[in-house]
Amino acid sequence: MERHLGEAKLLPGKTLENFDFEAVPMISKAQVSALCAGDGWLENGANLILFGPPGGGKSHLGSAIGLTLIEKGWRVLFARTSDLVQKLQVARRELALEAALASLERFDLLILDDITYVTKDQAETSVLFELISARYERRSMLITANQPFGEWGKIFPDPAMTLAAVDRLVHHATIFEMNVESYRRRAALERKQHGAGRPATYATPKNVGVPAPRDNQPET
């Protein structure tokens, strides 16, 4: 558990327990809880897509789902899409893209945060498309996006590539639309009122409330 949490790079402090479902009434807590079992959709390489304006809680919910899945034994990686795409571009220049994509297959769920922030550049969108294609019907992805599919022409310069990418993502997918006011702005105001300090960079057992293993227990 501790090792898998360390490699996941989840957002710190983002759990289902502190996600405000009342502020996002279009999201069913029961449905999210069912998805957090992981059985079925992860085994079949299905996807989960979260749409909504900035600050609507998409990243929080995505990271919280990832945390719950890790607790159930699944392997998860959370990444800003633009950062991961840049790493894949470097791998391509070093003729190691195939190996880089293969290394991601060990994760049952790849969370791509802010996919619509990828620069509309042929090199970036090409490796993003290859990533989507490589995981299609093999390994699951959770995508957060500020723009609906109709605006994804801003990501992929080629309309045919846009259609192909969307087709692969939605073929086996659950889609949540989170059209609410800024969840992030409300949280920032609450932190200011309570004098909270600078948040941590990644989730750790300490900041998500995972108990540390005893010395006589085997590593999980």
Image (cartoon, helix red, strand yellow):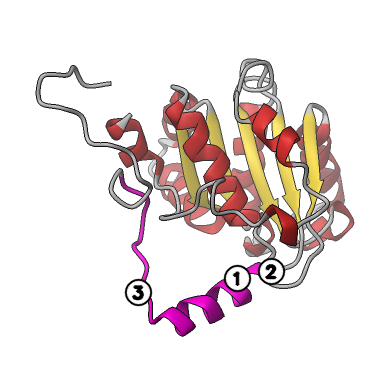
Instruction: Classify mark 3: residues with Cα within 10 Å, few (<14), some (14-19) or many (20+).
Output: few
Residue type marked 1: Arg
Instruction: Classify mark 1: residues with Cα within 10 Å, few (<14), some (14-19) or many (20+).
Output: some
Instruction: Check the image and report above or below for 166 versus 4.
Output: below
Earlier along the polypeptide chain: callout 1 or callout 2?
2
Q: Disc 1 vs disc 2: Cβ atoms closer than 8 Å? A: yes
Residue type marked 2: Pro
Q: Which residues are magenta?
A: 183-204
Residue 153 covered by magenta stretch: no
- CA gap between label 3 and label 2 equals 20 Å
Residue 194 covered by magenta stretch: yes
Q: Hey, which quadrant is residue 151 in on the image?
A: bottom right
Residue type marked 3: Arg
Q: Mark number for residue 198?
A: 3
Name the residue: 56% across, 45% down: 16
Q: Mark number for residue 150?
A: none
Name the residue: 81% across, 35% down: 170
- Which residue was labeled with disc 2? 54
Q: Secondary structure at mark 3?
A: loop
Q: Hey, which quadrant is residue 100 in on the image?
A: top left
- CA gap between label 1 and label 2 equals 8 Å
Earlier along the polypeptide chain: callout 3 or callout 2?
2
User: In the displayed structure, does residue 141 sit left or right of residue 23?
Assistant: left
Q: Secondary structure at mark 1?
A: helix
